[in-house]
Image (cartoon, coloured by chain):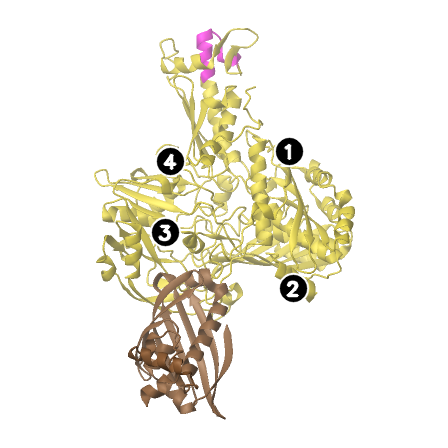
Amino acid sequence: MELEGTRQIRAAPDLVWAAILNPEALKTCIPGCESLTGSPEEGFEAVVVQKVGPVKARFNGQVTLSDIVEGQSLTLTGEGKGGPAGFAKGGAKVRLEPEEGGTLLSYTVEAKVGGKLAQLGSRLIDGFAKKLAEDFFERLKTAVEPPEEASEAEKEAAEDSEGTGPGDTPEGGRKKGWFKRMIG
Amino acid sequence: MPKDGIGAPMKRREDLRFLAGDGRYTDDINLHGQAYVWFLRSDVAHGRITRLDTAAAAAMPGVLRVITAEDFAHAGGMITAWQVTNRDGTPQAEPKHPILAEGKVRHIGEPIAGVVAETLEQARDAAEAIELEIEELPAVVDMAAALAPGAPKLHEDIDSNLCFDWGFVDDNKAKVDAAFESAHHVTTLELVNNRCVANAMEPRAAIGLYDRPMDHYTLYTTSQNPHVIRLVMGTFTLQIPEHKLRVVAPDVGGGFGSKIYNYNEECFVTHAAKLVGRPVKWTATRSEAFISDAQGRDHVTKIQLALDKDGMFLAFRTETMANLGAYLRLFATVTPTYLHGPAAGGPYRTPVAHVHVKGVFTNTVPVDAYRGAGRPEGSYQLERVVDKAAREMGIDQAEIRRRNFVKPEEFPYQTPMAVVYDSGNYHATLDKLLELSDYAGFAKRRAESEARGKLRGFGFSTWVEASGLAPSRLIGALGARAGLYESATVRVNPTGGISVLTGTHSHGQGHETVFAQIVADKLGIDAGLVDIVHGDSDKTPFGMGTYGSRSAAVGGSAIAKATDKIIAKAKKIAAHLLEASDADIEVADGKFTVAGTDKAVDWATICLTAYVPHNYPMETLEPGLEETAFYDPANFVYPAGAYGCEVEVDPDTGAVTVMRFVAADDFGVVLNPVVVAGQQHGGIAQGISQALLEHTVYDESGQLVSGSLMDYAILRAGDVPGFTVDHSCVTRCEHNPLGVKGCGEAGAIGAPPAVVNAVVDALQAGGYGIKDIDMPLTPSRVWAAMHEG
């Protein structure tokens, strides 16, 4: 199964690129990611909790980056073992193109499951992978875009939660542009 | 005549306990100190095990031992019961089938290690702590791909993925090809016989027990044939001699073939019980059943039928690939060969035929016999090609069959497929079908359906099978590594009650009722005096178990023979008591009477005399009254039937509704019409289920993607109408003492082609030129076929 999609991101390609290579940003962008360590060169170790249909599992796996064309495109490949639930593998080819006001990010994603996940969840996998990919790129967009003009109340709310790290907000939604602030 | 003798519609006695929830299944058995095993199974279809570290798992709470292939170094692989010879004279390929994976995994679900722990939960948790790494290898699922040069190879110890290349009857090949050369018409059909998961209601289970002081093992297991398991698992795989192993198969909730074979888990618990010094129990989850029970069917076939200008069959030939899965189970190679070929000619007089089957290894769960075992595949391909030929030549479906049937006066009939049909009357069953199905009124029913916007079709299937397995000398010549006789002991107790010990096994068939009727009938006593004992190798004489519709024809015949021996001895006792010659003693209504007189002794007196022999012909007769018989059939039995299925197809959605189903069967003498009707209903339901719903799907990497009852559809009672079943057309089996043929697999053999032919008929009548359509006929497939044509 392959999925395709695009995102218009109001941030420069180099910022988006930096986010994709950054473990902290990746951790926030991967839905259900409990931890992610490593580096773009060495690859990342990740722990991700996901639920596919009736099967919920904690996947221990690797995320590797390959086919890197600096600032333009790369392939993210992940493979996770979920113990008795089986395994999940997937990859995303990501391409960044500058466009007016920011970046056009386009992606193709494929996902595959094995073991009990395949036995029980195959018919759900397409929808699951689609949602997972959409969540990932939406979070990435949120991480790198500058904050919109927010109301005073929202600004206050954002300041109140300053003490928590970006990875602790599962939607990553309230901290618009946090990635730039973090690296800036 | 006793009221519950042969032919009486006696209700199944065993149902009292089954319906009340009082059955005693393997999982109901709990032994003192028992531990539990959870299996770590492969979640990839093909791969090399690069790391298997059990240390952390072994240290987990409650874990007694983590067992891997190393613990079975002394054991052999699991065996297969038949050696098929290739067309070139070489033997089939038999790669090793280890109990636990040895360095490689070859299908989803293959067991790699077993964790034995105090509780099932602890075993499960610890299994997660096993450090396992598998280097995934390319998997091959498609049979043609598996045979292609350069295909991923499953087994290092054989040359390719080809297990056998078998032709039957190979000597006829040239004659068959010549008949095609000169034929007026040739009909060709390519089809797939879809893979099924047996899905017995009771999942498999096993408990191993080891008695150290006695050096004796006991295995409780969900088996159709405990003695076979004792022999093949004990002697050949674990190397435990028979007298040191007891195998008990208590109540078993359905088998359909899937519980014939010796399984990895049975071997495991038996040996593990010794390793940990505790009984070890395993009960499959439904998920495990999907990936570890042997699956059924999975043939890809091209069949051709040659006809003359009158629609008379001149010859047929097939090219089949039979999927064996990753390993051979017990009947894996005989099922698509000698259980398939001999009856592949059906009820027709076709002079010559050739069946060519290649058995192929793929990275899928092993395939073996499943209700009908090779014969459903035979009847399906033949009845579909006959149906197509009739359409192509413009001959009525009933007429083309009638024209080609073996005639009633031609029995015994030597077929071109080596076997001799001893009896039958195919015209009679077809006539009965036409009558019961009101075939004459079909046009009216079709018009009525059309008025409602539905397409209606009528599908025929006239079939014959070879069952009642099997004449030992014949099958020995064909490569069987066992005999297929059956045993019975009739043990008369001192006060007249009788225990009948049989080597067959009942897992839904109703033996406890029907076998009692045989004995009661012969002795003229109440069936309530007779109990049936089965399923325990320590109690029953060596017997081969239940499959291949053999229990009545072979097991029942053994019981009849043993009862005859009892009668012969009882007559001698009666003759002594009555001061007459035993040749003059007659048996009726439980009385032994001197012919032509009113001098008689009753059954109770005979029994008491045998065991309290104060007045007894001790010089010429042993005391006691117990006899054992082994019965080896002289031939297969050849049940036959004519099935008619009427369907409606919704042209908007492709949905198929079975409107009527009529089965007119000839099972020979009917021992109990209620039990026979039950077998007919169950078999037909299973056949319709295969035709419309069941489908086992692997993705290209060998993942089973229809691995639960959420995705694998099985027929429910509400999906079909009530069936009309008939077994009044009786031709006696000519060679067994009861005159019986088999009925257990009939429905699953006869129903699928009737259903598919009915759908083809409906679509063609509706103006859709359907070329190919394969089971299962799901709405999407039917709709696609309608719009491709």
Q: CA distance from mark 1 to mark 2?
A: 44 Å
Q: CA distance from mark 3 to mark 2?
A: 41 Å
Which of A55 and B413 lies nearest the eye of the viewer?
A: A55
Q: CA distance from mark 3 to mark 4?
A: 20 Å
Q: Secondary structure at mark 1?
A: loop
Q: Compared with residue A4, is residue B352 higher up or lower down, i.e. above or below?
A: above
Image depth: mark 4 or mark 2 in front: 2
Q: Which residue is mark 2?
A: B784
Q: CA distance from mark 4 to mark 1?
A: 35 Å
Tell me, yes or no, whether dots 3 and 2 are on the same chain.
yes
Identify the chain drawn in yellow: B
Residue A144 percent location from the top left of the image: 40, 85
Q: Chain of mark 1?
A: B
Residue B427 percent location from the top left of the image: 71, 39
Amino acid type shown at disc 2: Ala
Q: Compared with residue B542, is residue B297 higher up or lower down, i.e. above or below?
A: below
Residue B502 percent location from the top left of the image: 44, 32
Q: Which residue is mark 1?
A: B731
Which of B9 and B99 lies nearest the eye of the viewer?
A: B9
Q: Name the residue rendered at 73%, 61% in the picture.
A: B768
Q: Name the residue rendered at 73%, 41% in the picture.
A: B434
Amino acid type shown at disc 3: Asn
Q: Chain of mark 3?
A: B
* Left or right of B694, for residue A116: left
Quadrant the N terminus of chain B occupies: top right
Q: Which residues are magenta?
A: B570-586
Q: CA distance from mark 4 to mark 2?
A: 52 Å
Please say whether residue B115 is visible from this viewpoint.
no
Amino acid type shown at disc 4: Asp
Q: Chain of mark 2?
A: B
Identify the chain drawn in brown: A
Please say whether residue A106 is visible from this viewpoint.
yes
